[in-house]
Amino acid sequence: MEHNAERLSLPALLLGGMALFAVVAAGFYGWLQHGSAILLAAGETALSWCF
């Protein structure tokens, strides 16, 4: 029984790792495309709180 549990957990672990990689890769791609706009918007918001 223990061998079956080990065999079933490996594909689930690989699938979870691939899903996590996909989320991180999509976030990194979005940061490369829109990172400067995100920083400018954050800066504008911070300045508006000051004034």
Image (tube, helix red, strand yellow):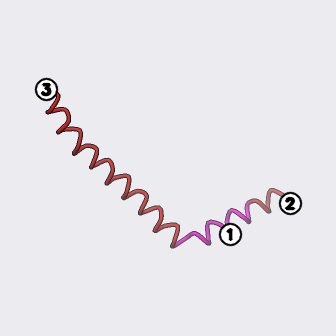
Look at 73% across and 61% down and name the residue there: 45
Q: Secondary structure at mark 3?
A: loop
Q: Earlier in the sequence, mark 2 or mark 3?
A: 3
Nearest to the eye among marks 2 and 1: give it. Answer: 1
- How far apart marks 2 and 1 lie (CA) works out to 17 Å
Residue on which the image places disc 2: 51
Task: Say which quadrant the N terminus sits in.
Answer: top left
The residue singled out by tag 1 in the image is 40
Q: Which residue is at a point 76% across and 59% down the rendered structure image?
A: 46
Between tags 1 and 3, which lies in front? 3
Please tell me which of labels 1 and 3 falls first in the chain.
3
Label 2: few (<14), some (14–19) or many (≥20) C-alpha neighbours in 10 Å: few
Q: Residue at x 67, y 66 (%)?
A: 41
Q: Which residue is mark 3?
A: 1
Q: CA distance from mark 1 to mark 3?
A: 56 Å
Q: Which residues are magenta?
A: 33-45
Where is residue 4 shown, x and y percent of the image?
Answer: 14, 33
Residue type, numbered disc 1? Leu
Residue 21 percent across, percent down from the top left: 37, 57
Seen from the viewer's position, the closer of residues 49 and 11 is 11
**Residue 34: image location, x then y, percent:** 55, 70
Instruction: Provide the secondary structure element on which disc 1 rests.
Output: helix
Q: Quadrant of residue 24?
A: bottom left
